[in-house]
Each structure stands twice: as C-alpha cells, then as structure tokens.
Image (cartoon, grey):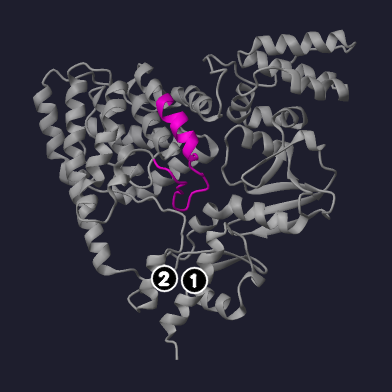
Amino acid sequence: MATPSEKLADSLDKLKQLQDNGVIAIKADALSRTHRERLLKNGFIEEVHKGWYIAASPQAIKGDSTTWYSSYWGFCAQFLTDRFGQNWCVSPEQSLLLHGGNTTVPPQMIIRSPESNNYKINLPYNTSLFLMRGNLPPIAERNEKEGIRMYSLAASLVRASPITFINYPIDVRTALSLVSDASSILALLLDGGHSTIAGRIAGAFRNNNQGRIAENIIKTMQRAGYDVRESDPFEIKLIISLSGRAHSPYGNRIKLMWQAMRDKVLQHFPAAPGLPTDKKAYLQAVEKIYVTDAYHSLSIEKYKVTPELIERVRKGTWNSKGNEEDRKQRDAMAARGYWDAFQVVEHSIGRILEGKNPGKVADEDHGEWFAALFGPGVTVGLLKPSDLSGYRNHQVYIGRSMHTPLNIEAVRDSMPVLFELLAEENEASVRAVLGHFVFVFIHPYMDGNGRMGRFLMNVMLASGGYLWTVIPVERREEYMQTLEMASVGQDIEPFAKFLGWLVGEGIKGIPVAKI
C-alpha cells in the first residue's frame, strides 16, 4: 500500500504534467477529485474562482499575493479562452497600456465579448474582470500577445478614451514611440471619419516629438475633406528625444520614467557634498559599515513543481517548512557572497572617486558584483556555473507585488538605456534613487536584484560624496511599499522622500540602522 508521501508525490506528478503543458489556469476537471483535494490540502494549489485553481507554494505566508500576481496574465488568458474561445479581447485602454509595456496587474480588467452578459467576476486580492457584452473590432484591428487578445496598436490609439492620455502619459507616449509611420492609423481615421480623434492623435504625436507623423495625419485628413483641428491631449511637453527605431517599448519607457521622476527626487534630497578630498578616509568609512549593511531581501519566483521536489516528497524527506540544512547552507553562501561582492563594489567606488564616470563604471563592473554575490553558491554546488553568465533567461516575479518585471527580451533592451541615463545624469541624487528604482523595476537577474539595486544606489551616492546608506530592516515594509508605488503607480515621490530622509540623517551623523 502506498504511503501518504507516495500518494502526494503521485498528485504532484499530475500537477507537473499540467505545468509542463503550459497550464496556468487549472480547471477542476483537469485533475481527479482525489488529486485535487490532496494538492489543495497540502497547499500546492489554491482556488481563485469557483472550479478554477492555480499552482501555489505550501511555504507561502498566509495572505501572500505573489502566487496570484505572478499567475494573473496567464490565468486570465486561459480562463477567458476557455469561456469565450477566440471571441474576446481586452478594452482599447488596457490594450494601449499593454502596447506601452505596462503589465502591472490592474484592479479591474474590462473584457469585450459578444457572448458576454455584462457581469463582474471577483478574483483574489481585490482584482476582478468585468465581462462586457459588445462587438469585437475587426480581425485586422486585433493582436494577441502571450494569450491576451487585444486591440492592435493603431486601433488602441484611435479607440482609447481621451482621459487615457492624461492618466497614463508614460504608457501612451511609449506606445506612440513604436509608430514609425501613420498609414495604419490613417486607415482607421479615414474609414471612420474621425476628424476630432485625428486632431487629438496628431497633437499627441507632435508633443511626443514625432512631428512628421503629426503633419501626415493632418494633411491626409484635410485632403480627404475633413476639417481637422489639432489638439494636445497631454498636460506636459516632452523634452527628451525618444528612439524612433525601437523594436520594443521598454527602452523608451525607461527614458520617459526618468524624465517624469527626476524633479521629484531633487525636491526631496539633500544637496550632494561633492567628491571627498580624502578618498582613503571615505573608503575606510565604507569598510566600517560592512557588517551593518550586510542584510538582503529576497525576490520570490513563480512557484514551479520540479522533479527534485517530487522525489523528495516521494522519499518522505520533504516538509512544508522546507529543508533546514538547505536553508542553512543557502544562508551561509549568501553571507559569503555578500562579503565578496561588497569588496568588488568598494573597488568600483574607488574608481569613481578617482574621477571615472559613475554610469560607465557601473555598466562595466555590475556583472562582477553579481558574479561575486553568487560565486560561493556555485562553489558548493547550490548553483550551476551558467547561473553567473549574465542577465536572466526566464521570467521572474517579485513577492507580493502587482508589478511584473520586464520579459527577458526587454531586459536586454532596457539595461543599456539605464546605464546611458546614469552616465548622462548630472545629479548624484537622481542617479542613486532612479538607478536603484529602475534596476529593480527591470529585475535583470533571477535572484539578488534587491541587493544589486542597493549596491548600485550606494555606488551612485558615492559619486556625489554622500555616505554609504543602509536601508534598515525595521523599515523594510515602508521600503517595499514605496518601491511598489513607483513601479505600479509611477509615483516616485514616496521612495525619494524615504531615501532622502535616510541620506539626510546620515549626513547629520544620526545612525538609522543597527545590528
């Protein structure tokens, strides 16, 4: 007779088969009642809507939203396709945000379908779907990306409400920057006789420094007999130049966030002391703070059932609290890696104190910081040597965050832009705050992004002569919440205030973190 551990391993095997087939939204009938109840009891799946489940982690803290947020887009795509087949798409406003690279989990997503009945489906953590009865756009005006059916870029710009340009300027500007010519937009404007919309879109392109497209829209509509009056739907004029050859929205999105956020940082940060004259004393002060600084936060990945886990369960060596020996070894290797990385970071600071451009130093050296951070894990076999090769090759998620980090292609588009912005920025405070924020917004590694972001912050602080600043573990919740506000709501002010206060207290000589 099979033991309880062997029975659970069999159920996990069924769950793994579903995951291997790309199933995120697990319908009740995809598992037998026995397997479903066993997995539910042991915390390996959780119900998110009647008869629908997602994979979960039995080690997750009660109320932890990570599993849901990391599964959200895949769940919605599969759930809606099961219900409506191909006859659904998200609203033009949500489509425009997605084209602009905004994959933040929305509180409510509006779905159009001729088969719907105007009703709301409540989902976990105050999220919901509103299934609106309505005709779909023509096939030529639709796109699909990772299972999400949406309006095409041109159609979403034409169909989105005017308030979208005011409420989501970064997303809309990023989407506009992906348009290389007006032909697809003009086809919709001309066929629909949309003279008012044409004026608004032309004004948006002109504000976005895409005057050639704006002129093309105005002149073509006028030649067709329409009276078009250009109007600017944005509240602020764009003062930076965006790439017109971008293959993805993310590089331009990072530039737009930087422009929108830098003034807020300057408002809440003390003036930079300037590079120290006694460089040796500065580096000695950095060395002294190492023990206090050696804390880290963890990024939580999307939970997956692995063959190793199944075998551990089968042999009865798994428990819901995790393996104590594994945890101790990981903690020890993390501590050793932090020490190794700290010394490499200290060397980078020394280069900056000698007058090197801080953005270029960070660009050249950050790979070495990461390799040092996780090198000990490779040495003892916790990690593979290939884990030190560079930026991640898989999607990663942040614990309890509605922000979905950039996909792997976007990481490679965005990281060079981040270092260009750091190299060109004149203010050390902006380099420190936005460098940290944008780094963790991108989340370029599978693990260690928080530690790397804080290393980057302190290297940029050193470029202005600020002292090394420790983020106290006692204020971790505030730290994470302000980062979340910046990532999800594009509101950098709370994060800038938080870091500005910490740095200011350091300048006064007031300790804000203790062991």
Q: Give the amino acid type for the residue marked by disc 1 in the picture.
A: Asp
Please say if 297 is above or below 453: below
- Residue 310 image label: 2
Please say if 460 is above or below 405: above
- Residue 13 image label: 1
For the stretch drawn in magenta, the main secondary structure is loop
Number of numbered tags placed on the structure image: 2
Instruction: Please give the name of the residue rendered at 30% of the width and 21% of the height, measured from the top-left corner.
Output: 360
Q: Earlier in the sequence, mark 2 or mark 1?
A: 1
Instruction: Please give the name of the residue rendered at 9% of the width and 27% of the height, measured from the top-left corner.
Output: 281
Any part of residue 322 in sight:
yes
221 horizontally vs 368: left or right:
right
* Quadrant housing residue 229: top right
Any part of residue 127 in sight:
no
Q: CA distance from mark 2 to mark 1?
A: 7 Å
Give yes or no for contact between labels 2 and 1 (Cβ–Cβ under 8 Å).
Answer: yes
Residue 218 pos. (x, y %): 78, 11
Instruction: Please give the name of the residue rendered at 66% of the width and 72% of the height, measured from the top-left corner.
Output: 29
Q: Which residues are magenta?
A: 392-417
Residue 123 pos. (x, y %): 64, 59
Dot 2 falls on a residue whose secondary structure is helix
Q: Give the amino acid type for the residue marked by disc 2 in the picture.
A: Ile
Residue 127 pos. (x, y %): 63, 54
Q: Nearer the viewer, residue 144 or 206?
A: 144
Instruction: Please give the name of the residue rendered at 38% of the width and 46% of the height, measured from the top-left corner.
Output: 446
Please say if 286 is above or below 256: below
410 is within the stretch colored magenta: yes
* Quadrant housing residue 442: top left
Q: Nearer the viewer, residue 157 or 306?
A: 306
Bin the neighbour count of mark 1 within 10 Å (Cα to Cα): few under 14, some 14-19, many 20 and up.
some
